Every structure is written in structure tokens, then in C-alpha cells.
Amino acid sequence: MEMVEEKPAVGLARKNLPVCILDDEADQVELSSEKLTKLGFPTFGTTNPQEALQQIRVGNCRAVLADFKMPEMDGFAFLERALQCDPGMYVVLVTGFYSVDSAIEAVKRGAYDYLCKPIDFARLTKTLDELAELFSQKSQVRSLEEQLLSNLQFQGIVGRSPAMLEVFDLARKVARHYSNVLISGPTGSGKELVARALHQMSPVAQERFAVCNCSALVDTLLESQLFGHIRGSFTGANETRAGLFEFADGGTVFLDEVGETSLPMQAKLLRVVQNREIQRVGSPELKKVDIRLIAATNRDLRAEVLAGRFREDLFYRLSSIEIRVPGLSQRPEDIPLLIQHFLRKYSEAYGKPFQGLTRRAQIALLQHDWPGNVRELENVISSAAITANADFIDVGDLPANLQKPLRRSSALEENWRPLPLDEVRSSHIERVLDMCNGNRVRASQVLGIGRTSLYRFLKRSNKKAVAKGA
């Protein structure tokens, strides 16, 4: 009879699938270990379930062949504990009392297979070869994903959606030529990363990149921070100090949340944008600065101009080039890539070589709305990487609001009560206004009505409220 030569790929796959043998009978552990070792599987045998669980915790095995009937812990209890330690673990249960119902129950609880004693080693070998091939395929997929992740990074920004590719393309085109750029987008979407990318690709990449969060400072401090001051110009000014515009002379200044600045401050910024001139607080001297200016906002500055809260001349000066960064809900195809990026980042940061996320954890993340955008996703992966103890991050490692997301429909049903149509319309318009942060222009666009109709309705609502209060 001609011997069938084992394929080298099969032997290599088997070497990459360490197996733990768990049975309360030592001779059965020895027999199974000997046979699997001859087949090329790295094996470890024990009669102690706690020792097997410890091997799973430290990542010494990828599959477990466990006896169902053990005095200390039965097969289902061990299966549950093993999957808690590592949700990606392959567990094959072995029993002397096989039944179809118990086999189905085992698979439902997460077992990969359910075999009966005495063990049919031909079937066991086939099962383990399937696992070895599956594990090899997953390793190859991870390797390809790592390569893809590297190819889809743009100056440290991750994205492959059409919306982000458009952002990258525009950034490349303007990086060498811009003097003023406005970056708009929701909070947490990555506006500062785009600003840094513009600076890194510009001719002044070797010069300074200065950042100022305009929403974090009151006007007097913001003016001193940006323009500098001379000694004695205000209480506490014990020494003359240059501002960020002078500090970054020759480089780039990034004004984050420029839409939060007051009208007087906007007038001062306009002079910098128009003439590249600054004046320190308390000094009559004008100084020329050679800077590239990038401003960012999460507000609709066009609506702010119409509402009289932002200077029109400053807006048009800043927005000669505008880059819109989409929120995460507008680019859901980037979520898996971002998860992988942050998982790799925090695996290295915390010294935990994660294999990935379990399928149910991935589903939970993909179903979330991400109101906090990329920043929220990064925080979720960071905190999960801290708490997770297994090779795979599972649902239990995620924040509580992601573990059991509330169904919106049920919440609405619980709070539902019959209302007059006018009250329903009023409530809906108020909710849309809240969503738009009081921006009536944006709210009218969302509602699909003209601004005049919205203003008329709000005026009528205010009269009704006054009459009701009287």
C-alpha cells in the first residue's frame, strides 16, 4: 500500500496550533499527548482544570481537548471559564455518554466540536487540522490587514472611505501652497491630525507647529497667548513675553475651535490674516510675522456669519481653502480599519499582544452611532485594552453602553403618549434645534422647510408660551 506523503503546509500549520489535553485520567492524557505529538501538534497534558485554564490565560495553547466528566469541574463549566479567559479559544469536548442533544448544547455554548470516547483519532486529527488551517488563515489575514493598514495611512491618519480619500487628495494638493486653511468637522473627527499633516507636507515642515485651543481661554488670556505682551501691560505681567504667532514665525499656527472666539478677538485675528502683522498687548509696535495659518471649527461658520456671531470678512479670508472632515457616522467603512489601528497602538503601549476582537465585540462596535467620532472609538479601544486579559477583546471588556445598547424604538414606545399634532410638531422642531446646537439655518435644512417658515413657527411658539405663562 502506497503511503500518502504529508504536505509541508499541513505540518507547518500543526506546529502553530499548540493543544492542551485535559482529562482526570492520567493514562488518557499520556495516550492522547503521545499520539498528537507524533502528528506534529505541540501538546501539554494535565489532569487539573485550573492548570489548563492558567495555560489558556498565558497564551500557551490555542486549542483544548477536554474531558466532559471531571470531578472538580464538568465540561460545560470548563468551557465557560475557558472562553472567559480567551474568547478565541478552540475547545473540543470529549465524553463517554454521547447524545445529539448534548452535542448541540455544547456547540451552542461555544465548543468547536463534541467527540465520544474512545476517541476516534482519525476524526480528532481531521478536526485539529481544520483548526490549524483556520488559525493559519486568520494569521495570514492579520498579516494582510497589517500591510493594508500601512498602505492606507496618510501622514498618520487612517482611512479608506471615499470621503476620507477626498480629504487626503485635497490636503496633498494644497499643502505646498496654502497660507490660510479652514478645517471644518464635528468634534473628535481628527481635524488636528489633518492640520498636522498639512504642516508636515508643507515647505515649512521643519519649522514650528504651534497649537492654540481658542475655546479654552478667555479673551484677555487668549490675546496674550497669541500676540504676547510686554512687562506691566496687565496685572501679573511680570515679564515681556512673545506670543504663539512670534514663536512660530516661519512655521505654522493652528487655531483650534476658532468659531468660539468673540467678535473683538476676531477683529484682531483679521489683521494677522490680512497683513501678517501682530501687536503685543500693551505695545504700540507692529511686528511682521511669516506664518501659515490653519483654523479649525466644529461650527457651521456660514450660519454663524448669518447670525452675526462671526465676522464675514474673517470667514472669507480663512475659508479660501476649506477642508471638511467627515464624522465617523459618515464613513462607517473606516471603523474596522480604525479598530485595527488603535488595537495595534494600545497593544504596544500596554505590552499586550492582542490577536483582535471577538465577532460579537466587532458587531457591537459596528452597530454603535459614535457621536464622539474617532476620539470616542480610540477611548473605547484604549480602555478595553487595559481591562482585557485574553488574546481577544470581548464584549465584556467594552463600556456598559456598548455591551447592551438600548433599542431606540423600545425607548420611544415606553415614553409614547397621545399628543395633539401641533405639540408633536413643536417637540420635533425643538429636538432638531437642539441637535443643531441652536443653529436655525442648519435646522431648517434638516427639517426640509425654509428659514422664514421656521422663524414664523418659533415666533408663534414664543407667543403661545407667553400667553400660557400669563
Image: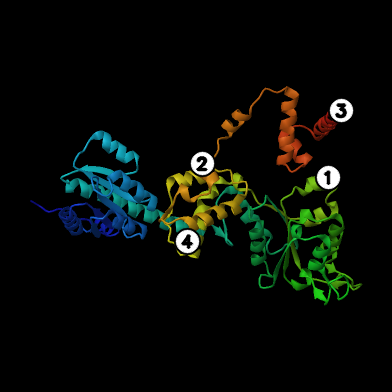
Q: Could you tell me which secondary element the residue under label 4 belongs to?
A: helix
Asked whether the viewer can see residue 86, the reply is no
Which residue position holds label 2? 404
First-in-chain label (4 vs 3): 4
Which residue position holds label 4? 347
Q: In the displayed structure, does residue 203 sit left or right of residue 46?
A: right
**Quadrant occupied by the C terminus:** top right
Which residue position holds label 1? 306
Q: Label 4, label 3: how many angstroms apart (C-alpha)?
A: 61 Å
User: Does the CB distance between marks 1 and 2 fall below 8 Å?
Assistant: no
First-in-chain label (4 vs 2): 4
**Three-letter amino acid code at disc 4?**
Ser
User: Does the CB distance between marks 4 and 1 fall below 8 Å?
Assistant: no
Q: Could you tell me which secondary element the residue under label 3 belongs to?
A: helix
**Three-letter amino acid code at disc 2?**
Lys
Q: Could you tell me which secondary element the residue under label 2 belongs to?
A: loop
Which residue position holds label 3? 467
First-in-chain label (4 vs 1): 1
Q: Label 1, label 3: how many angstroms apart (C-alpha)?
A: 30 Å
**Which one is closest to the eye, mark 1 or mark 2?**
2
**Which one is closest to the eye, mark 4 or mark 3?**
3
Which residue is most to the left?
1
